[in-house]
Structures are given as C-alpha cells and as structure tokens.
Image (tube, helix red, strand yellow):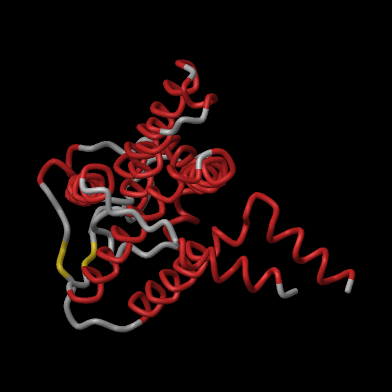
C-alpha cells in the first residue's frame, strides 16, 4: 500500500504522467535509429558541399557540441514544469521532425566524408572528438538532429511565458548557447553544411505547422487515461 501511494505521488508531482508520451517516443526513435544504423547498406548517398572543404576544424567546439545533451534535457524539463503549453509545442515539433529524419534515413541512407584520418594537433579536445567519432558513425546525418532539436527547443524558450526566460540576460545566453551548438556541428566535422541547411528547412516547416497552423499534440486523451489509472492505484 505504501509503495502504491509513493508511486502515485511521484506520478502526480508536476503531472509527470504527461511526459510519458515523449518518453515512449524517444524509446521508439532510438530503437528505429539503431536498427537502420546496424543494417548493412550497399549504397549511401554522400553528403558534401564545396563549402565544407573550407570550414576549419576548431576542436574546442566539441564542448558546446556535447553540452547539447544537457541543454535539451534541462530546457525540456524546465518547460515541462513551468510552461506545459510551450513544452507540448516543443514535443510536437520534435516528434514530427525526428520522424521525418527516420524516414529519410530509412529510405535514403546517407553519409558524410568529412572526418580526418589524423588530427593536426593532439590535445584534450581532439581526443574527445576522436572518442565521439568512435561511438557516433558518419552515417544518416541529414537533416542534423543536433541542429533541428536545438532550434525547436530554443524557439520555445523564446516564446515561453515563463518569467525566467523573459529576462534579457537569460534570453541572450540561451541564444548564444544554441548558436554555439549549431556551429559546433560544423567545426568538429560532425555534419556538412547541407545537414545544417536541411535542419533549418525542416524546423521552419515544423514551426509553421505548430505555431501558425496550431497543430499541437496536447495529449489530452492520454492525460485523462493516465489520471483515471492513477486514481485506481
């Protein structure tokens, strides 16, 4: 009985059950992505623009690149607690865009040839990039999910009614942080300029659908079902 009450309190805290649809979607996304990554393909579309050859490797940008994980988790958690309307809009854009990415990667497997055989320098940042490259393959790279997700979340941080994010200093800081994340995808050669541009285009479409057309997944039916199930605990 005590365990049930504790579990019920946890779920009711900030309406935590409301985040479960996004949680399940992420499990679905990661599973699908892993499957298409491990399936051997006979052909990959090579993603490369001429401008990519002129973009230098700036190894310290691995820090903002890796900070993306904290940026996403903290920002989405903050929106969830303080502005669920903005959270739902962010989730809608993320779900639509990431599903489009999975479909593109499934139908049109792609890769980028930008990674170096040998780093021009040996320092802590190049070693971090080397380890990153070992765990993250250069396949299925467009549109850049790093860029797309950052733009979706940042757009909601700029639109939220939460007082903290209405402060000028905080707004400038989050915009700079988001910009550094986007640039980092190029400067550590994780993505081509094509990946970034297609991510911008996909974000623009999703933003139009959610903000201007008002298509938002509010998960109201899920919330009703979840509250009824919790009440029976």
Residue 170 at x, y percent in the picture: 49, 22
Q: Is residue 102 above or below residue 18?
A: below
Total residue callouts: 0
Residue 127 in view? no
Q: Is residue 45 left or right of residue 11?
A: left
Q: Residue at x 37, y 58 (%)?
A: 217
Residue 104 in view? yes
Choose top left, top right, bottom left or bottom right for residue 181.
top left
Furthest toward the right, the residue is 2
Choose top left, top right, bottom left or bottom right for residue 42.
bottom left
| Front one among 233 and 87 | 233
Furthest toward the top, the residue is 168
Q: Is residue 177 left or right of residue 57?
A: right
Q: Is residue 107 left or right of residue 83?
A: left
Residue 150 at x, y percent in the picture: 38, 43
Residue 188 at x, y percent in the picture: 36, 44
Q: Residue at x 70, y 69 (%)?
A: 231
| Front one among 76 and 35 | 76
Q: Is residue 230 left or right of residue 190?
A: right
Q: Is residue 138 above or below residue 43?
A: above
Placement of the C terminus among the 4 image quadrants: bottom right
Placement of the N terminus among the 4 image quadrants: bottom right
Q: Is residue 103 above or below residue 131?
A: below
Residue 19 at x, y percent in the picture: 54, 58
């Amino acid at each position: 009985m005590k365990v049930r009450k504790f579990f019920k309190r946890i779920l009711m805290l900030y309406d935590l059950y409301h985040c479960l649809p996004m949680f399940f979607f992420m499990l679905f996304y990661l599973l699908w992505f892993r499957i298409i990554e491990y399936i051997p393909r006979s052909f990959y579309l090579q993603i490369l623009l001429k401008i990519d050859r002129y973009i230098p490797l700036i190894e310290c940008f691995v820090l903002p690149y890796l900070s993306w994980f904290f940026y996403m988790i903290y920002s989405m958690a903050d929106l969830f607690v303080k502005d669920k309307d903005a959270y739902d809009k962010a989730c809608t854009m993320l779900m639509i865009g990431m599903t489009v990415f999975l479909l593109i990667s499934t139908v049109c497997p792609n890769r980028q040839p930008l990674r170096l055989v040998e780093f021009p320098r040996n320092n802590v940042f190049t070693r971090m990039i080397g380890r990153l490259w070992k765990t993250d393959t250069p396949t299925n790279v467009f549109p850049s999910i790093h860029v797309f997700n950052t733009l979706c979340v940042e757009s909601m941080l700029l639109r939220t009614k939460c007082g903290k994010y209405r402060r000028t200093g905080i707004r400038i800081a989050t915009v700079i942080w988001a910009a550094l994340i986007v640039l980092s995808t190029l400067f550590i050669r994780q993505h081509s300029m094509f990946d970034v541009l297609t991510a911008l285009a996909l974000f623009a479409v999703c933003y139009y659908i959610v903000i201007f057309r008002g298509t938002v997944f509010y998960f109201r039916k899920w919330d009703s079902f979840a509250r009824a199930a919790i009440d029976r605990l």
